[in-house]
Amino acid sequence: MSRSTELDHIGVAVRDLDNAIKFFTEVLGLELEKIEEVPEEKVRIACLKLGNTQIELLQPTDPSSPVSRFIERKGEGIHHVALRVKNIHELCRFLREKGLKLVYEEPREIRGERLINFIHPKSALGVLIEIVERR
């Protein structure tokens, strides 16, 4: 069984979304696809096209958000790597059976367009891995 199908995106934690967008578009030449608020995760994000994948810039909207805490501890930078999967519920069951810790008990639905969960860094060699099922 193939568990992930491709790289979905790379998440980058930033303090100032507008400045980060300017850098990635004007300096690196990436195309801005969309900006959206994700209240479930307490972030505002910008998605930038990079080949067949995306760079996802994450600016916290609340000081208690995980992204805000990440920036306080580690500074701006790569926050997570996201893998696209076909059946997130099946994969979550499989990962738990293997003894891995997931951030959410059940996958979260974001805007009716995707389901997400995260493999905790303590279970993934220090890397926060998001799993995403696109609809």
Image (spheres, grey):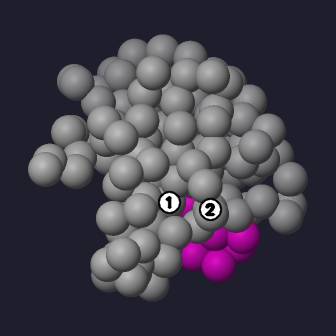
Q: Which residues are magenta?
A: 69-78
Q: Is residue 112 above or below residue 17?
A: above
Which quadrant is home to the C terminus? top left
Choose the circle earlier in sequence order: 2 or 1: 2
Residue in front for this viewpoint, 37 or 93: 93
Q: Which residue does the numbered mark 1 point to in the structure image? A: 118
The image position of residue 108, as x and y in percent, is 63, 45
Residue 128 visible in this rendered orientation of the protein = no
Residue in front for this viewpoint, 91 or 48: 91
Which three-letter amino acid code belongs to the residue tagged 1? Phe
Disc 1, SS: strand
Of the numbered discs in the image, which one, if any, rests on residue 104? Answer: 2
The image position of residue 22, as x and y in percent, is 54, 28
Is 47 magenta? The answer is no
> In this figure, what is the number of numbered marks?
2
Q: Is residue 11 above or below residue 80?
A: above
Residue in front for this viewpoint, 77 or 22: 77
Point 33% across, 64% down: residue: 94
Q: Is residue 76 above or below residue 25?
A: below
Which three-letter amino acid code belongs to the residue tagged 2? Tyr
Point 45% across, 48% down: residue: 89
Q: Is residue 125 left or right of residue 132?
A: left
Q: Are the residues flagged by discs 2 and 1 in contact, CB closer than 8 Å?
A: yes
Structural distance between the alpha carbons of marks 2 and 1? 7 Å
Q: Is residue 15 left or right of residue 33?
A: right
Most frequent secondary structure within the magenta stretch: helix
